[in-house]
Structure formats: C-alpha cells, structure tokens
Image (spheres, rainbow, N blue to C red):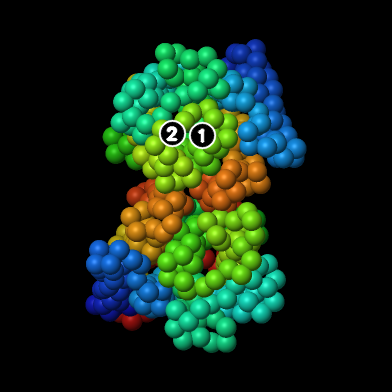
Amino acid sequence: MTQQGRFIEQDIQVNRLIEIVLLAVMFATFATHISLHVYQVVANVPPAQRVPWTTLAPIFSAFAMAHALFMLGWRRALAFFALTAIIAFGFEYIGQSTGAIFGRYEYTDVLGWKLFTVPVAVLLVYFMVIYPCYVIANLIISANPISQLHTMRWILWAAVLTAFVMTAWDLTLDPLMADQVKAWVWLDGGQYFNVPFQNFFGWLLTTFAIGSAYRFAETRLPLAPLGRMKKWIVILPVAGFAALSVGDLFIGYPADTRVIPLFVMGVPVLAALLHFYEPPDRPETTPG
Amino acid sequence: MLTVQRERLVIGALVALTLAGVGLHGYQGVATGEKPGLLAASLIFGLMSLGHAVYLLGWKRALTLFVLSATLSYMFESLSIATCAATCYAYTGVLGWKLGSVPIAIPLSWFTMMYPSAIIANLIAEGQPVSVKGGGVWMVFLALLTALVMTAWDLTLDPYMVDKVKAWVWLDPLKDNYLGIPFANYLGWVEVVFMIVLIYRLAERGIEWKPLGPATHLVVALPLISYAVSGLPDVVIGVPDATRLIAPYAMGIPLLAALSRYAQMRFAPAAAPVTTAEG
C-alpha cells in the first residue's frame, strides 16, 4: 500500500477497459444527476411538478452501482445491491400490508412499475442513497470510504450511523412525496408535517437491517476494486448525496423544512469531506 | 500540570457539575415534562464548560474563549435587536435579569453550548478534543462545523422557547418560516458562531496551551453529555411536536460522529504523563 493508500492502493492491477467504462458511466450519471437537481432549483419547479423519481432513481442508482463496482469490486457491489433490494422489499411489503413498520400507508401509481405492491423505483432509491451513506459513515469513522473496522461492535455501530444519516434525508423527502407528489398516502396522517413519527422509526430499522447485513456479508467477500481510486472519485457519492437535499434549502416543502437539511445533512457531509483535506500541524501545539 | 490529588479534585468537581446538570434536566423533564430554566441550566453547564476549558486548555485560553463568546454574542444580540438588521425580535421578561435589551442568561448560554460544540467538532475532525492542526482552510472548516453543530441545538430550542416558554417573540416571521421562527435566525446563529470560533482560533495562537491534566475518556465524555442532555430530551418533551423528530437527527448525528472518534481516541496530546510535582 502506498502513502496515498489512505484511500486505496493506487498500484493495483486493473482492466483498463472496465475502468474507463465505469468512469464514463459515473461521469455521465453524476453530471445528469447534478444537472437535474440544479435545474429544479434554478427553475423553481413547483413541488407537485418536480422531476419524477422514475427518472431520478435509475440515473443515480446507476451511478451508485458503477461507483460500488469501481471501489469495492463486483462481488461486494452485487451483494450490496441484492441485500438492499431484498431487505427493503421485505420491509416495504410487510410494512404496507400490516402498517406495523412505517405506520399505515399505500403506494399510488406515481412511482411506476411495481413488484407486487412495492414500486421498483423505491428499491432503487434505497440502494442509491444507502450507498453514499455507507461511504459517509466509513469516512466519519475511519477517514476511509471503505470500512476498516470489522468487529461485531463496529459493524453494528457503523450501521446505526448509516441509518441515521440516511433517515435524516427523509425529514425533507417524505412530506413532499406524500403531500405534493402523492407517491404514497399516509392513511392516518402524522405529527411531522402529516407524516407519522413511526415512518422514521421504520426507516431507521430498515436501513439499519440493510447496513448491518451488508457489513457482515462484506467481511466474507474479497475487496477487489475494478478501478484505481482517487480523492475526487471518493467525493462523488458524498456530493451526489448532498445534491439530493441542497435544493431543499431553497425549494423544500413545506417551507418549514428548508433549514433542516443544512444541519442534518450538512454535518455528516462536512464531517466526511473534512478528511479529504490534510491540514498542516501547528507549531505551537504542544501543551506547555 | 497538577499533582495527582489536585487533578482528581478538579475532575471530581467537573463530574459533579455534569451530574448536577443531568439531574436538573432529568428532574424537570420527569416531574413537569419541561426543560429547566435557561438561566439555571446555563449556570450549571456553563460553569462545567468553563472549568472543563480551564482543565483542557489552561486558564488563559479558557478565559479568552469565555470572554470572546459572551461579549461577542451579547454585542450581536444587542445590535440585532436595536437595528432589526436581519429580522426583528424582542426578549420578554421570562429569562430574568437583563443587561440592556438582552437577558444575562443569553450570552452565558452561548458560551455554555459553544464549548461542547467545539469539542464535538474537534473530535469529528481530528479525533481528539483539542485541535492541533493549523492552516486557514482547516480553521474555516472547523469553525463552520462548530457553527452547524451548535445551531442544530436551536432547531428544537427556538420553537420551544417561543411557543411554550415565551422567552422571546419574533416580530416579523414572514410567510415562509421554520415552525414560526424566521430563517434569518438560523443564518444569524451560524454566522455568529462561525465568527466567534474563528476569532478565538486566531487569538488562541498567541496564547500558551497549559492543560491541567490528560484528556482521558472520562474527561472528554463530560461536554458530550452536557450537549446531549441540553437537546435530546426534546425527543419526548419537544414543542411543537415536529421538533421531537428533528432532535435525534440534528443533535444525534454530530454526537454519533463524535462518539465514533471518541471510541478510537488514544490519549490526546494534552495527555502527557501526569507529573507528581507542581509543574
């Protein structure tokens, strides 16, 4: 491992063709993702007419998948995606049938194709958001985008942090999706801008289950990156996650939620990004 | 450095103050379902923050931080009340004795929360409670992080103090606001904390760092506890209801992030071996 190996080995053997293809996919999907979110803010698109998630989800989940393949290798990337889709489907299916996990809700037809009662776009959204949250949690804990601590305790802790960072995003997402986009309906309303508190417990539970399942699986799967990592490549998922809610500072719905992402998303994103800057030591910092 | 006995005495006093603060919040919360008065809470945790700063930084740095944060926050508050620069507000009589237009509890509580917020930011950024890294960019990063960590507290505090305690009133909250609080308030908080921390960090460079003892896990835990206790009970007692959900993310995420590094903390540079004689 070289010195820059703070992020990952630079001198690994990779297939140049695969590396270039993955970089191209990442670049194209990331640029589209950012453009769509910038466009919504600049054009001040009314809440009910935002770019549909049937467009946003495939784009950013393709980015997340390409990034995971690049950084973790195909086994870990596919395991991450498969575990996310299966566990999220289980929680959503049971949650919707019984009302016991998120509270009582129903998906409308706004999010497109469904697998039984759960829109496929929802499963993609789980993956495309939990992947950057996994990277952010790793950066916060170990200053490295790839998990470094594999004891039971750290796996569970990292999964808790990931769950909180991801659910924080739903503080601005859910009121908009339920009230305006009408992607789902809360049958009993709720105390958080018409969303029930239980929804957020459900999110914590679901994302914790996914995060810990993947982190356990990861310890048995080889780390075999398909590309050579660089700082700016690590920053992409963090920036892409931030882009999901930077717009909410200006056009969030309801207006009350506009200050929330500055803190609940700003702190984890800043905490993760700090590690890309290597500050000099101060001469005077030895205690007298 | 102090003798071992005196060091234990100082740490014991800090622990006692922390427990007193936790007890006050706990008792009020359980007995009445309310937050304790801002003045009482700030006095106890403020004294803890000040004593803790003396222990970790030495009395010169601690006093610098205290004086800077109390006077600058007082000045900013007085100025913004007088000029309505960003938005108009006024304190009622609820918070007690005032100095001009600002209750004395206010600058005190700025210091009380700014100190643990800075410790949390340092832990997140450098894995230890005292920042030893330099450079302008890093200072700006840390000041911004401290500002966000501290202002996160106000997401639950401000609506509570306005709706329930009626400690101050917003005179023109506009149509778009956060649970009745103008957005300008939050920008104002972030700016003021950012400025104070940056000024402190610049001032600190010329002042000797003389900790009284090592930054052990016990010592570093105390400000984390005071930060947590000052806001997390809102999960149960927050007003209005929406803030009950916001508290665990706004204040919980910085705490989780800081604890992640706290758990890996080796003895910080402040942790030179304790000398047996007066040093």
Q: Look at label 2 and name its amino acid.
A: Trp
Residue identified by numbered label 2: A186
Pick whichever, A254 or A4, lies toward us: A254
Q: Do tag 1 and tag 2 residues touch (Cβ < 8 Å)?
A: yes
Q: Find residue A46 and report its horizontal and vertical position in percent.
A: 68, 37
Q: Kindly state the secondary structure of the residue where label 2 is placed.
A: strand
In the image, is residue B77 above or below residue A251?
below
Q: Earlier in the sequence, mark 1 or mark 2?
A: 1
Q: Find residue B103 and report its horizontal and vertical position in percent.
A: 50, 81
- Asked whether residue B212 appears in the rendered view, the answer is no
Q: Kindly state the secondary structure of the residue where label 1 is placed.
A: helix
In the image, is residue B143 above or below residue B95?
above
- Asked whether residue A256 appears in the rendered view, the answer is yes
Residue in the picture at 37% in, 31% down: A104
- In which quadrant of the rendered view does residue B274 lie? bottom left
Residue identified by numbered label 1: A178
Q: What quarter of the picture does the C terminus of chain B occupy?
A: bottom left
Pick whichever, B171 or A19, lies toward us: B171
Q: Find residue B169 and report its horizontal and vertical position in percent.
A: 54, 71
